[in-house]
Amino acid sequence: MNGSPQVKLRLTFAGRILLTNKKFILFFFFQKKNNKGSFVSVNKKIKKLFQVAEKINREKDFKKIIPLLADLAKELLEVHRMSLFLVDKENQRLYTILAHGVDKIEVPWGTGIVGYVAQHGESLIVPDAYEDPRFNPEVDKKTGYRTFNIIAVPLYNSKGEIIGVFQGINKFFDEFTDEDLDSLTLIAGYAASAIETKFLHDSLKEAYEETIIRLTHASEFKDKETFNHIIRIGYMSELLGKLLGYNEDFCYNIRLASQMHDIGKIGIPDSILLKPGKLDPEEWEVMKSHTIIGYEILKDSKSELLQMAARIALEHHEKYDGTGYPYGKKGEEISIEGRIVALVDVFDALSSKRPYKPVWELNKTIEHIQNLKGKHFDPHVVDVFLQNIDEFDKIREMYKDEE
């Protein structure tokens, strides 16, 4: 089976339907049964596949899917270790996203068995690693491990490109067989599909984030705020969310949503927004309406992130004691994301240079925030913030405005 591209492509495709087509699994394993084996052992493999299939079909987290597949391969092939390598074309290397027994392995492109498989697209069974000239013993030397035999198959994406290698080391009983190779090829097909989906998701996520940041920055061109102010607000809000114990989704959302807190300023006339002096009462009322404008822009989205952004746009000038605007909400009437952004926005404004004020010293900023605890700001949010003030100051320094 090693030499035929048609067979490799067929098995790669089969791997993609492994966990959704039970009839195919039954047919495949009974047709490919090892002559030394029995239908009892085949049945055990099928049962194990179905058990893992149920878990993977329910599981959405890529970080959990890959270990499930590696553990499945380890059990079905009866090997000591499995490693899943990805190809890094830019840096001409392969690196593991999972490797039983070690944290991470990196090998140069074309080096060792995995390098050969990645370069040539050929599935391999190596009965004696140290007798094979393609084997690279450097990993064994570094880790103190002893490799005896190896099985390795390439991972293909939907375009037929090799994106990685699935490798098993040291079979417990007897030698690797063609059935082992077929089983690993099936599992590798599903792993490749999961990896490609993850890459696509990450690419879309990156584009989504960049779009939000750029659109938000565009709305700030009229104002005197800086691009780095937007970035700082995002990272500070995310950090404060983590410190307050909120989950990963909340913290990711608030990092992006908080950057849209002033998006409503796009609807404020330049004569008011850019006025160098103090605003008169009527102008101030117009300025305060940027909170409602921002909310109206964002409120009808079905996206949880943009719904959070709408709440932040509306509430980031509300105060804990009810003296803020636009609606005089107080205490927990204000969403937690609104309370978080209210604090980090003031911190960043005070600790950054503006045309109308110099940078405040950190101690003066801390004292000011402490004095507004329970008035402007949620007391618990203030406590957590000030207990970790050095971390927030690091963000300020990392993304400070250009002179």
Image: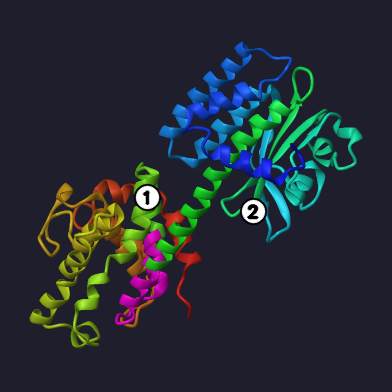
**Residue type at numbered disc 2:** Glu
Q: Nearer the viewer, residue 329 or 51?
A: 51
Q: Nearer the viewer, mark 1 or mark 2?
A: 2
Q: Nearer the viewer, residue 332 or 321?
A: 332
Quadrant housing residue 29: top right
Residue 345 % position (x, y): 31, 64
Q: Is 329 displayed left or right of 216 in the figure?
A: left
Which residue: 66% across, 21% down? 33
Which residue: 40% across, 73% down? 227
As helix, strand or loop, the secondary structure at mark 1 comes to helix
Residue 359 % position (x, y): 39, 73
In the rendered view, tell whether residue 122 sits above or below residue 230: above
Q: Residue furthest left?
A: 282
Residue 386 visible from this viewpoint:
no
Residue 213 on the magenta span: yes
Q: What span is in magenta?
A: 212-234
Q: Which residue is mark 2?
A: 161
Q: Check residue 251 in the rendering and tell me which mark sits there, or answer none.
A: 1
Q: Nearer the viewer, residue 296 or 18?
A: 18
Locate the N terminus and report the quarter of the image it occupies: top right
**Type of secondary structure dominating the magenta stretch:** helix
Q: Earlier in the sequence, mark 1 or mark 2?
A: 2
Residue 119 % position (x, y): 76, 51
Residue 236 on the magenta span: no
Color style of the picture: rainbow
User: Few, some or many C-alpha atoms within 10 Å of disc 1 (few <14, some 14-19, many ≥20)?
Assistant: many
As helix, strand or loop, the secondary structure at mark 2 comes to loop
Q: Is 187 displayed left or right of 128 in the figure?
A: left
**Residue type at numbered disc 1:** Cys
Mark 1 and mark 2: Cα distance apart in space: 35 Å
